[in-house]
Image (cartoon, helix red, strand yellow):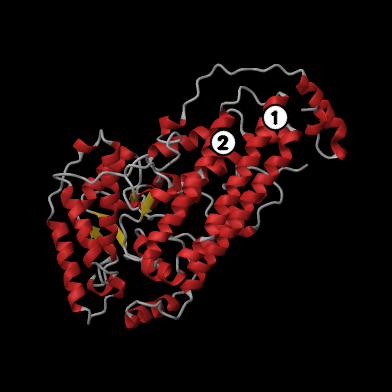
Amino acid sequence: MYPIDLLPSPSHIFNDALWVMQSLYASRRVSNELHPVPADFDVNLHTNTGFLPPQPLPKLQEPFDVWEDALSQAQKVLKLGEDLLEEHAEERAEGELWRQRIRSLPTLTTETLHQEPQLLRRAHKVLAFLVHFYVHSIPPDTRNGSQSIVVPLSLSAPIIAVSRVLRIAPVLTFADTVLWNWDLVDPKQPATIENMRFGQELFSGTEDERNFYLGSARAELIGVQMLHIFNDYHNLPNVTDLSSISKINRLLARLNTVIQEINASVQSMRQIVDPHVFYWEVRPWFNGSGSGSGPSAPVWIYEGVDDTSKLDLSGPSAGQSSVMHALDLFFDIDHKLRQRRYPAPSDANKHADRGFMERMRRYMPGKHRDYLAYIAEYSRPIREVAQNTPAIREAYNTAVTTLKKLRDSHMRIACLYIVTMSRSTTPPVGCPMFAMAKRMEREAAKSGPVTGTGGNELSLLLKAGRDATARTVLKH
């Protein structure tokens, strides 16, 4: 490689040539500090599953198999309570019988699971699905006007216990629905997207729900390539000599390609998930405490907990994807508007939920959150290196711009699947027509902005994230 190959545009020839000449004489400084490895954070690069475990979660055995049995039964008999009108007497009776059985279950202690990570994850997933099945199968007119729903001790106590060990929110999360919700088509073969069956547990029983989890997981597995790139960058002995600069440029080019692949995967969701089915049959099950129906949404009370309001109970969201958080932290995307960047944030940006991304990390497994903190605290942040190194600035800006395009695509998908569907007046094919029409009438009567499953104003949130990404691009 010749120094001239690393020079940027002619307008910066003098300054950049001076920098290149200095780097020619820079010594290779090899760091003696010991870096953690991804495996320390339950990030599986050797199996190329990343934030997904290397193997499917095994089913729980006695005495915890009563939870497994309850979940299996729930998927057979329960329906969304808000779609059960008074004339649906049989379905209402089946639902109430299932909930009575849940209330009568023994309150099991979970200490025997605490040293088995895979069983702990399984316990969290099963309990979280049970909590959401319990809450959302209750017909609203049977609550006697109450603005709260009590989650019984048989569920609240064990999910709180396993969540404390995993350091994750005691509610359904992205990890439960995507990262931990799969098995192998052929157990003798490795875990690859072609050999994984997603949607091991489903609320609606539809292929659209299964494909929604598949599409989300595909982006996660593509993102494993990012994690390899981050690891390669962190393992560079230094970032100042010409050889290192050349490697960083190649890493950024690879990263740009990976982001493009994730973008293509996000856009392909339209071919495998029907927006009507997702919005009306799948998404309502995801809503957490106080979210999904505006001010009228019931608040959940976990029996045995002194103050449930202190718990994180929003429910699953794409904002809980550790892969996307890792990418943001690697690039130093300033979602909280702490830094002065150009162009200045709009008034809408300022009014968006600037703590959303940070809050979503509380819904991740604790070790994954530790990994994100490790990336955020790395001593050689790539944006700072790109600011000080003209020869890699263009590659950095290209990758950030591609990430902004990914966020543009996400906004279009969210608009189609949530905003547009929230104004829909045509029931999806296959739904109980009258009940669905009634629910659509109730939705149409609501005022105010469309919110995500976490209760945040969706358009403001997505625009703020996109604009924060655009402001990350460095000036030439």
| Position of 423 relative to 292 (above/below) | below
Left or right: where 365 falls relative to 145: right
Which image quarter is the C terminus in? Answer: top right
Residue lying at 29% horizontally and 47% vertically, measured from the top left = 124
Residue 359 in sight in this render: no
Q: Work out whether residue 21 or residue 59 is closer to the camera in this orientation and state it.
A: 59
Q: Earlier in the sequence, mark 2 or mark 1?
A: 2
Q: Work out whether residue 268 or residue 39 is closer to the camera in this orientation and state it.
A: 268
Residue lying at 41% horizontally and 30% vertically, measured from the top left = 40
Residue lying at 17% horizontally and 76% vertically, measured from the top left = 90
* Quadrant housing residue 114: top left
Which image quarter is the N terminus in? Answer: top right
- Residue at which label 2 appears: 229
Left or right: where 131 falls relative to 196: left
| Total marks placed | 2
Q: Report, in whole angstroms, how far the alpha carbon at label 2 lies from the one at label 1.
A: 14 Å
The label number, if any, that marks residue 28 in the structure image = none
Amino acid type at circle 1 is: Ile
| Position of 280 relative to 152 (above/below) | below
- Residue at which label 1 appears: 245
- Dot 1 lies on which element? helix
Amino acid type at circle 2 is: Ile
- Dot 2 lies on which element? helix
Q: Position of residue 204 (x, y in %)?
A: 32, 65
Left or right: where 431 falls relative to 306: right
Q: Work out whether residue 289 or residue 474 is closer to the camera in this orientation and state it.
A: 474
Q: Position of residue 467 (x, y in %)?
A: 63, 54
